[in-house]
């Protein structure tokens, strides 16, 4: 449940549970305790703790005087590092705490309001039982502290120093306060203080109004729920992992990592395969693209070469044989006719004829197959040569167009650059 904190106190006769929201009590429970097997009772109590559907509940557990001790530490130098102090305290716990049949687990020492160090010691068997029960019930133990250290949070205490006796059922403890915090405690049997000097003790402070109606039996559990864990010597959550939970936790982490890797492979393997295939396809296309470009350039070179050959052939076809043309003129002209001048170009030309009668010669030229548009280019003049009177006539003509191998007959009349563009 959101905003709800739960404190659990374990005493000789019962387990008390209190859940608060702010400082308002919202749930209480008492689980009778059997000394023979109190783990089952603790598990029953933990299963009744209010919990959220989204996460495991967090609880603060305090152990009664029979399972915990709170002592002010004397004789330790103030200049040592806290880790060094913790190691020294763990190695020499019997110097500061009563040693029972079980090994003691000592919390990290804290400096109290008076500047002195104080710490708490716990029965190692009880700590292991609490950790195992919490793991079995899927509950996170936020801390394990001494019930005496949590008790001032449930009492109306002054800011100065004080000492009083506190008892729940048959358990009685002498508690020493300083600035509202418990810094030392000793168990009391029959009016005698064990492991401490008996002194004058005032009456116990009254309970806070929030817990008064539930009685003194729930005071330690209420104090655990509302206290600040940073101000009391306690074992933190990381110190409460049971011995047999570590392999299981490691196996769970390994299984989770394996499952995450499998899911990642299932999600991303097809994309990786497709990406690899795309990269190979791009490489293949790049290699064949080079070959394709080279082939295209070769084909273009072949086309240009063929076009050049065609233009050469066309040029050769356009050239006329002057010998053949002169032969045709010789065959067409009468024997009495002489050609005194002949000028030709690629399109046509003109000639000067000398003959006794030039008009019949002009008609004969019309029958030459290589010529067309034969016409006189000037008047007929008469000249006397060698005692003979001859007629002189200038004739203009054009060469007859003919079909070429690489184009129509009209290509002959185009400029050369136009024919080249057409052939390309």
Image (cartoon, helix red, strand yellow):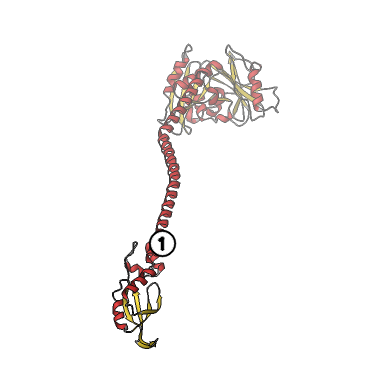
Residue 106 appearing in the image = yes
Q: Is residue 9 left or right of residue 400?
A: right
Residue at the spot of label 1: 312
Q: Nearer the viewer, residue 404 or 238?
A: 404
Q: Is residue 309 left or right of residue 141?
A: left
Q: Quadrant of the N terminus?
A: top left
Q: What residue do we see at 42% from left, 59% from top?
A: 308
Question: Relative to 205, is 326 above or below?
Answer: below
Q: Position of residue 397 (x, y in %)?
A: 34, 77
- Residue 363 at what x, y percent from top left? 28, 79
Visible residue check, residue 213 = no
Q: Secondary structure at mark 1?
A: helix
Left or right: 46, with 373 as reference point: right
| Residue 191 falls in image quadrant | top right
Residue 238 coordinates in the image, percent (x, y): 54, 25
On screen, residue 233 above or below 374: above
Image quarter in which the C terminus is found: bottom left
Residues 284 and 119: in front is 284
Q: Position of residue 85 (x, y in %)?
A: 66, 24
- Asked if residue 73 is positioned above or below residue 342 in the image, the reply reads above
Name the outermost residue toward the front. Answer: 387
In the foreground, 308 or 170 = 308
């Amino acid at each position: 449940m959101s905003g709800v904190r739960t404190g659990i106190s374990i005493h000789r006769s019962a387990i008390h549970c209190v859940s608060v929201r702010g400082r308002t009590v919202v749930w209480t429970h008492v689980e009778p305790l059997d000394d023979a097997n109190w783990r089952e009772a603790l598990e029953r109590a933990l299963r009744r703790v209010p919990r959220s559907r989204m996460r495991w509940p967090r609880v603060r557990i305090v152990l009664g005087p029979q399972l915990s001790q709170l002592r002010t530490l004397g004789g330790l130098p103030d200049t040592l590092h806290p880790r060094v102090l913790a190691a020294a305290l763990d190695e020499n716990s019997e110097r500061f705490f009563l040693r029972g049949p079980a090994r003691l687990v000592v919390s990290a020492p804290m400096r109290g309001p008076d500047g002195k160090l104080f710490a708490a010691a716990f029965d190692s068997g009880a700590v292991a039982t609490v950790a195992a029960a919490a793991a079995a019930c899927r509950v996170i133990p936020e801390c394990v502290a001494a019930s005496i250290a949590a008790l001032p949070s449930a009492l109306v205490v002054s800011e100065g120093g004080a000492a009083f006796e506190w008892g729940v059922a048959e358990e009685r403890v002498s508690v020493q306060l300083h600035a509202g915090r418990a810094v030392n405690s000793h168990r009391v049997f029959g009016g005698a203080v064990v492991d401490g000097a008996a002194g004058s003790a005032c009456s116990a402070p009254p309970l806070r109004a929030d817990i008064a109606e539930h009685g003194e039996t729930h005071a330690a559990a209420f104090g655990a729920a509302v206290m600040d864990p940073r101000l009391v010597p306690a074992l933190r959550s990381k110190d409460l992992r049971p011995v047999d939970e570590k392999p299981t936790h490691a196996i769970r982490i390994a299984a989770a990592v394996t499952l995450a890797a499998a899911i990642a492979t299932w999600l991303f393997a097809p994309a990786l395969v497709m990406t690899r295939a795309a990269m190979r396809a791009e490489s293949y296309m790049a290699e064949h693209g080079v070959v394709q470009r080279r082939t295209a350039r070769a084909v273009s070179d072949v086309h240009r070469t063929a076009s050049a050959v065609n233009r050469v052939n066309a040029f050769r076809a356009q050239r006329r044989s002057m010998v053949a043309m002169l032969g045709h003129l010789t065959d067409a002209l009468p024997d009495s006719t002489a050609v005194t001048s002949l000028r030709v170009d690629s399109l046509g030309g003109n000639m000067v004829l000398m003959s006794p009668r030039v008009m019949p010669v002009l008609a004969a030229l019309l029958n030459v197959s290589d010529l067309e548009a034969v016409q006189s280019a000037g008047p007929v003049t008469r000249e006397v040569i060698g005692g003979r009177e001859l007629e002189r006539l200038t004739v203009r003509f054009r060469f007859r167009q003919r079909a070429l191998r690489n184009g129509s007959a009209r290509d002959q009349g185009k400029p050369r650059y136009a024919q080249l563009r057409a052939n390309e």
